[in-house]
Image: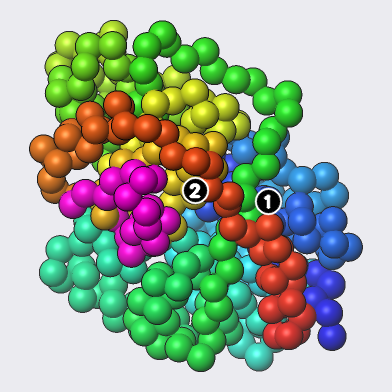
């Protein structure tokens, strides 16, 4: 039985990587002749322009995470063949659906989008988080991870060893007509990602005084840490060397123009920005925020991976790659990812 109708859900369209990949997959599923419904708390935001034509959008009218409780009633009404949970952030909603719908709940497939080991957790919170992860096999039918290393870690933590697949995200296609961004003169160290605590852009800003005077840091993204980052920039007198231009629909052009891409996160799942940068021949400097980072940057000619708390090592790596030869472009995996998801959905349905 094919999974003719796929339901997926999101809190908002504010510009996260999870939702960007979710919309790319949805567009490919629509192109394959499937019906796709997106239930979204707030349908406004930078990603609204990336919502694929033909998708059924059910807006809850409010961004609040708790608004997702209405998903149970919507699922009963629409009766989809399968539910796709696009990331860790949403698995609590998946648990609610399984509890609320019981035997009437369609199969739920969840994608691992963030790290199992969270650097922002203390000992007590980490223990609670692991207890929560161990329950996932009770309400998820299948887990998808994007690399073998993350799959192995997640399958053990979630007790889903026999119900886990590896499917990378589909590559981000070029966005013809998307507004570009004028980069400043000189060499650019680029950051791409939401301005949130997890990304630790403060580490990149703190490294600027150690970089040559012709280097400018540009961070593309938006989020609730903007005010704090702007205060840090002002306090350090770096207003002429650090730019925060906001969200950009297609960062690939900026990546190709940058001297290197930096990702100083505390924790990540499988950061697509690393693969995107490498696909246009731009070296990367990243913290060891996930097992997947060393999988992606597996060749010393592609970039450097440093410990999360090694500020000196991070600055040294930035300086090295500002002068090192650019790597050859690395093709992104995932061209067949949408089809592999559909094969999985059909099997479960």
The answer to whether residue 90 is above or below residue 42 is below
Q: Which mark is residue 24?
A: 1
Reading the image, the residue beneath label 2 is 275
Residue 181 covered by magenta stretch? no
346 or 103: which is nearer to us?
Answer: 346
Residue displayed at 36% across by 84% down: 156
Quadrant location of the N terminus in the rendered image: bottom right
Drawn side of residue 307 relative to residue 143, left or right: left
Q: Quick one: which residue is furthest to the right in this view?
A: 33
Residue displayed at 52% across by 29% down: 256
The answer to whether residue 104 is above or below residue 186 is below
In terms of sequence position, does the residue under pointer 2 or pointer 1 come before the other?
A: 1
| Contact? badges 2 and 1 (CB < 8 Å) | no
- For the record, the magenta segment spans 289-307
Residue displayed at 58% across by 52% down: 332
Drawn side of residue 212 relative to residue 133, left or right: left
Q: Quadrant of residue 238?
A: top left
Q: Quadrant of residue 105?
A: bottom right
23 or 312: which is nearer to us?
Answer: 312
Residue 206, percent across and down?
17, 28
């Amino acid at each position: 039985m094919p999974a003719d109708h796929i339901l997926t859900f999101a809190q908002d369209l504010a510009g996260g990587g999870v939702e960007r990949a979710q919309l790319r997959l949805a567009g490919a599923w629509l192109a394959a002749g499937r019906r796709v419904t997106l239930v979204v708390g707030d349908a406004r935001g930078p990603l609204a322009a990336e919502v694929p034509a033909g998708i059924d959008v059910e807006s809850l009218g409010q961004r609040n995470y708790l608004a997702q409780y209405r998903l149970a009633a919507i699922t009963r009404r629409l009766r989809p063949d399968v539910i796709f949970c696009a990331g860790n952030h949403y698995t609590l909603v998946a648990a609610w659906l399984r509890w609320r719908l019981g035997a009437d709940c369609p199969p739920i497939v969840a994608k691992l989008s963030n790290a199992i080991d969270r650097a922002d957790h203390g000992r007590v919170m980490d223990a609670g988080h692991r207890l929560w992860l161990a329950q996932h096999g009770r309400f998820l039918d299948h887990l998808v991870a994007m690399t073998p290393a993350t799959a192995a870690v997640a399958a053990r933590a979630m007790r889903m060893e026999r119900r886990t697949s590896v499917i990378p995200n589909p590559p981000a296609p070029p966005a013809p007509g998307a507004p570009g961004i004028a980069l400043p003169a000189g060499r650019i160290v680029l950051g791409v990602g939401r301005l949130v605590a997890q990304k630790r852009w403060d580490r990149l800003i703190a490294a600027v005084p150690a970089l040559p005077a012709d280097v400018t840091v540009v961070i593309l993204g938006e989020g609730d840490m903007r005010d704090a980052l702007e205060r840090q920039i002002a306090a350090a007198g770096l207003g002429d060397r650090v730019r925060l231009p906001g969200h950009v629909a297609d960062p690939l052009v900026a990546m190709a123009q940058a001297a290197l891409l930096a990702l100083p996160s505390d924790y990540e799942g499988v950061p697509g920005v690393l693969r995107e940068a490498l696909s246009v021949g731009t070296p990367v400097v990243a913290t060891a925020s996930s097992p997947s980072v060393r999988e992606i940057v597996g060749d010393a000619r592609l970039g450097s991976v440093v410990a999360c708390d090694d500020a000196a090592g991070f600055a040294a790596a930035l300086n090295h790659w500002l002068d090192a030869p650019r790597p050859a472009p690395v093709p992104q995996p995932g061209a067949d990812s949408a089809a592999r998801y559909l094969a999985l959905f059909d099997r479960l349905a």
